Image: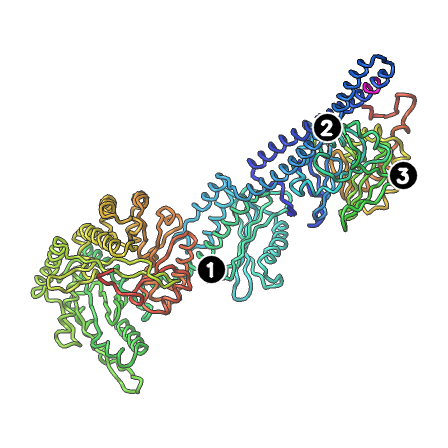
């Protein structure tokens, strides 16, 4: 599946560039997004080493490499940052990442930190180009301690990183979540085990509920739109997960969701 | 690169190439970034250990007393320091190279994207072109199809759909009281879906054609069996081709649109657009031609002025009557009427009044006939009547009654005076006088001639005894005389100029055969060509003409340095014989006349009769450099397919149409459509019978390329 325009007003677009096939990355399927505003592009979570060629091949359909104005990393995981050093060969654009992960990045083979911009815990407003602003929204401990989300007010799309991520079985594939109840089995286990605690979830839901959101775009799996957006937020807000479920060291009360 | 391309914008092979090359470039990038990071840790390590070593040397030096050893160590330290500097230079240089390589790679990646964009825009897949021709091959314009144009359009769409599947097709026409939209649904759709299509796509088409959306709409819907079904009609792509300026001759056609849920590549879009343009042509032309055709059908057997039947119909009916009467042993008669001194009426009172008189005379003749008798106007002031199942006596009574009635008919001149018109009538009876169509016609001619000789306003029967021998002798002696003329090569090409309608300059000459009589008179082709063909002498005539024309061009090259373009007529016989190929080629080689200066004219009816062989024949000759013109185009109806099969460089539009374009709407539409058709097929057009400046100007406006006729230049015996 390639190139789904989630939003397109002509001058402003929000595109799912490349949902990498599991074969390309011998891990989990991940989504890479490109936001284009006139001649400026912002790449969200460029992906691991293996997916870079196909991501860039798709990206070049919309903009040139020199028009990449920013790269935003939702967190520090290898499926997000793995290919970064090669991206830095191509672009001088700033790379946004949580302050608390800055010091770990050199371990991905990154020689110079000159291009990196740390994002404070409370998030920040980014002006990419005139008329093109993105809001970096904190999403700590969901699952990463320093996760950030990206809100695009023109497209009304919130990029949620690992929140909302689904693990679809290999034989199932759909691009959008239109029936939340049917989708639930594919997210529940992951969220219970990987999200740190209900408090983090609840605070996040309360914060993002103030935004005008039409689409939730996670880093893995199908995209939430329409009724599935509030359905997901309501479910997540009440979810007991992570430390909430810890009974004693190494044991979780996962119910049916033991992996 | 601002514009966003669709996912399927690239054809597959270019997309594959792009991805493959991108992957290779990334491998380069990745290996560069890995090497760089590896090299930088190594150099950091080297620098650190090196510095540490030097320090220890310096410290050790303080403990050595031997001045010679101190000197040696000092030299070694200096060398190491220099090595250090060289190493820094190496590291700097490598950094610089890496930076440059990175920059180049980046450029290559961007340029690769631009190149694939460019390739995708110019390369057309062979299979796509093949699909295009499949669609085009299905579009065969024929008399029957054009007259049923609505069914014809559906048939074409079904063929189009098989090769480029689509969901809907739309055609918009401007009508007197608003707009007509034709909706074609490929396959079955629910009423609700159709409603959605009507509202959304109909409006979209109006928008794309720049038409007001609140206009009065008349919708016609057609369902064409097809297989393409879709769940989501909201994501329909529409390609619209508008008709630029309500082009003349397309009968109000405003545009067509193609709507499909399938994603199309840029190339497919281009090809489909070109097919849509052909559809515009076909639909518009078919619609206008179907109307013209029904008028033409009427006028093919009727005389436009008087409304009675014409010569063609007469010929057909005479032939029919001969066959029928011979089977049933009936008698019948033919009357031939020629008005006496009618030319004077035209000259004195003018043509309009003359025409009125002709109309009244036609009425008068028909009013005195029985049902089943056939009255026809043969042309000018000549009328003919077939009286089936009529013995000679009855024929004579009928002829006399027609003559007497005409004599009593009074006409008013513009100055209020009465005047009368009389007629001479010849009669021939079957089977008493003659038994074949040709003989009957010659016989009735003789009888009419005799009636005139008797002092006009007379009825005269054919007198076999007096004339039969004379007729036979005449016809045979003409053939004999022609044979002799050919043997003695008393055939002279005359050259009539063909001019470029735009520049007015002479473009070529048509060579026309004339016969030099022994007494020095010159006879034009029209007077002997029929006998030539009838007695099988066409091939000889063509050979003489081909040779003399090529020789004439030799002379021109000699005197003026370069050849002129000369058209030569080929007869049906010569085309069957095909011997002309070797002959013309040999002559050209021998006389050093370039074949490209020769254009052969072939009559439409001859070309049609043997299309397969004709195709090969033309191809062979074309390889030699000769070009071809299709003569008298329009006298029958053809098809795109047919014109494609037999590629002609030129088409000569039948003079019978050209001559009338100022007065006849039908002929004007016909010539204009033929011109458009030829333009579309990249064939140059020549209008014959250009008899006035007005005709010439109108031809030029219609886009006809060249003109020929008395107004432009008479045939002359020199070039």
Figure check: B469 above or below B61: below
Report in which chain the residue with disc 1 lies: B
- Between tags 1 and 3, which lies in front? 3
Report in which chain the residue with disc 3 lies: A
Using the image as rendered, state which of residue B107 and residue B312 is in the foreground. B107
Q: Which residue is pictured at 24% across the width and 54% down the height?
A: B558
Figure check: A50 above or below B513: above
**Which contiguous range is marked in magenta?**
B52-56
User: Callout 2: helix, strand or loop?
Assistant: helix
Report in which chain the residue with disc 2 lies: B
The colour scheme used to paint the residues is rainbow
Percent x, y for residue B612? 32, 43
**Secondary structure that dominates the magenta span:** helix
**Residue bearing mark 2:** B91
Percent x, y for residue A170? 70, 28
**Residue bearing mark 1:** B250
Q: Are marks 1 and 3 on the same chain?
A: no
Quadrant where the image shows the C terminus of chain B: bottom left
CB atoms of marks 1 and 3 within 8 Å: no
Percent x, y for residue B417? 28, 87
Q: Quadrant of residue B385?
A: bottom left
**Residue bearing mark 3:** A203
């Amino acid at each position: 599946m390639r190139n789904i325009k989630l939003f397109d007003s002509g001058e402003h677009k929000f595109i799912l560039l490349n949902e990498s096939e599991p074969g390309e990355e011998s891990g989990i399927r991940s989504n890479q997004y490109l936001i284009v505003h006139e001649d400026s592009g912002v790449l969200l979570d460029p992906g691991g080493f293996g997916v870079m060629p196909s991501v860039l091949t798709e990206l070049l359909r919309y903009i040139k490499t020199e028009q990449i104005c920013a790269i935003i990393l939702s967190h520090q995981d290898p499926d997000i940052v793995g290919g970064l050093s090669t991206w830095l060969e191509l672009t001088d654009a700033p790379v946004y990442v949580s302050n608390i992960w800055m010091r770990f990045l050199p371990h991905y083979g990154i020689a110079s930190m000159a291009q990196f911009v740390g994002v404070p815990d409370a998030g920040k407003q980014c002006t990419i180009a005139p008329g093109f602003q993105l809001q970096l929204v904190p999403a700590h401990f969901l699952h990463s301690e320093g996760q950030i989300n990206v809100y695009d007010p023109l497209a009304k799309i919130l990029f949620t990183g690992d929140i909302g991520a689904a693990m679809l079985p290999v034989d199932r594939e759909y691009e959008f979540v239109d029936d939340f109840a049917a989708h639930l089995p594919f997210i529940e286990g992951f969220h219970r085990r990987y999200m740190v605690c209900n408090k983090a979830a609840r605070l996040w839901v309360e914060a993002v509920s103030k935004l005008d959101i039409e689409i939730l775009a996670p880093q893995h799996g199908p995209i939430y739109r329409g009724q599935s957006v509030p359905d997901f937020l309501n479910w997540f807000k009440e979810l007991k997960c992570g430390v909430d479920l810890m009974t004693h060291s190494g044991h979780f009360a996962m119910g049916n969701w033991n992996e | 690169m601002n514009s966003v391309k669709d996912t399927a914008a690239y054809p597959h092979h270019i997309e594959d190439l792009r991805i493959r090359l991108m992957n290779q470039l990334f491998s380069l990038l990745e290996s560069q970034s890995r090497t760089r990071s590896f090299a930088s840790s190594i150099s950091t390590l080297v620098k650190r250990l090196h510095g540490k070593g030097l320090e220890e040397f310096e410290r050790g030096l303080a403990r050595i007393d031997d001045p010679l050893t101190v000197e040696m160590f000092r030299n070694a330290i200096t060398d190491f320091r220099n090595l250090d500097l060289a190493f820094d230079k190496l590291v700097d240089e490598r950094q610089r190279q890496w930076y440059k390589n990175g920059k180049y790679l980046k450029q290559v990646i961007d340029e690769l994207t631009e190149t694939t964009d460019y390739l995708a825009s110019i390369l057309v897949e062979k299979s796509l072109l093949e699909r295009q021709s499949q669609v085009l091959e299905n579009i065969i314009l024929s008399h029957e199809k054009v007259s049923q144009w609505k069914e014809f359009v559906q048939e074409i769409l079904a063929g189009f759909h098989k090769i480029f599947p689509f969901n809907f097709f739309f055609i918009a026409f401007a009508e007197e009281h608003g707009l007509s939209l034709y909706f074609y649904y490929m396959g079955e759709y629910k009423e609700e879906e159709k409603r959605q299509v009507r509202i959304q796509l109909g409006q979209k088409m109006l928008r794309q054609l720049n038409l007001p959306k609140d206009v009065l709409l008349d919708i016609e819907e057609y369902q064409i069996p097809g297989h393409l079904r879709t769940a989501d009609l909201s994501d329909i792509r529409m390609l619209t081709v508008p008709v630029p300026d309500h082009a003349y001759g397309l009968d109000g056609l405003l545009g067509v649109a193609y709507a499909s849920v399938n994603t199309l590549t840029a190339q497919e879009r281009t090809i489909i657009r070109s097919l849509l343009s052909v559809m515009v042509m076909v639909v518009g032309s078919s619609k206008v031609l179907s109307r013209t055709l029904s008028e033409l059908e009427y006028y093919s057997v009727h005389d436009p002025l008087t409304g009675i039947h014409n010569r063609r119909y007469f010929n057909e009916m005479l032939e029919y009557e001969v066959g029928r009467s011979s089977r049933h042993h009936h008698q019948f008669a033919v009357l031939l009427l020629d008005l006496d001194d009618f030319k004077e009426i035209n000259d004195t009172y003018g043509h309009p009044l003359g025409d009125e008189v002709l109309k009244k005379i036609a009425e008068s003749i028909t009013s005195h006939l029985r049902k089943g008798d056939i009255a026809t106007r043969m042309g000018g002031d000549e009328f003919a009547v077939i009286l089936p199942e009529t013995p000679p006596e009855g024929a004579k009574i009928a002829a006399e009654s027609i003559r007497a009635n005409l004599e009593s008919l009074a006409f008013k001149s513009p100055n209020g005076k009465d005047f009368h018109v009389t007629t001479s009538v010849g009669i021939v009876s079957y089977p008493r006088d003659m038994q074949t169509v040709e003989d009957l016609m010659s016989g009735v001619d003789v009888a009419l001639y005799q009636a005139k000789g008797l002092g006009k306003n007379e009825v005269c029967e054919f007198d076999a005894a007096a004339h039969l021998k004379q007729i036979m002798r005449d016809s045979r002696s003409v053939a004999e005389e022609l044979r002799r003329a050919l043997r003695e090569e008393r055939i002279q090409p005359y050259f009539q100029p063909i001019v470029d309608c735009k520049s007015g300059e002479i473009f070529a000459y048509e060579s026309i055969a004339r016969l030099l009589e022994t007494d020095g008179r010159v006879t034009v082709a029209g007077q002997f060509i029929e006998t030539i063909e009838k007695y099988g002498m066409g091939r000889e005539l063509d050979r003489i003409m081909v040779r003399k024309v090529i020789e004439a061009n030799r002379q021109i090259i000699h005197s003026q340095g370069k050849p002129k373009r000369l058209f030569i007529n080929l007869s049906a016989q010569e085309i069957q014989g095909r011997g002309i190929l070797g002959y013309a080629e040999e002559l050209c080689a021998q006389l050093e006349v370039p074949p490209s200066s020769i254009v052969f004219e072939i009559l439409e009816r001859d070309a049609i009769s043997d299309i397969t062989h004709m195709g090969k024949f033309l191809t062979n000759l074309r390889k030699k450099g000769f070009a071809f013109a299709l003569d008298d185009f329009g006298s029958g109806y053809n098809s795109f397919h047919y014109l494609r099969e037999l590629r002609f460089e030129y088409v000569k539009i039948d003079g019978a149409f050209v001559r009338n374009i100022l007065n006849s709407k039908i002929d004007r539409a016909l010539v204009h459509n033929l011109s458009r058709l030829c333009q579309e097929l990249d064939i140059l057009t020549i209008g014959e019978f250009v008899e006035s400046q007005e005709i010439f100007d109108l031809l030029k406006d219609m886009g006809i390329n060249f003109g020929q006729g008395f107004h432009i230049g008479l045939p002359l015996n020199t070039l």
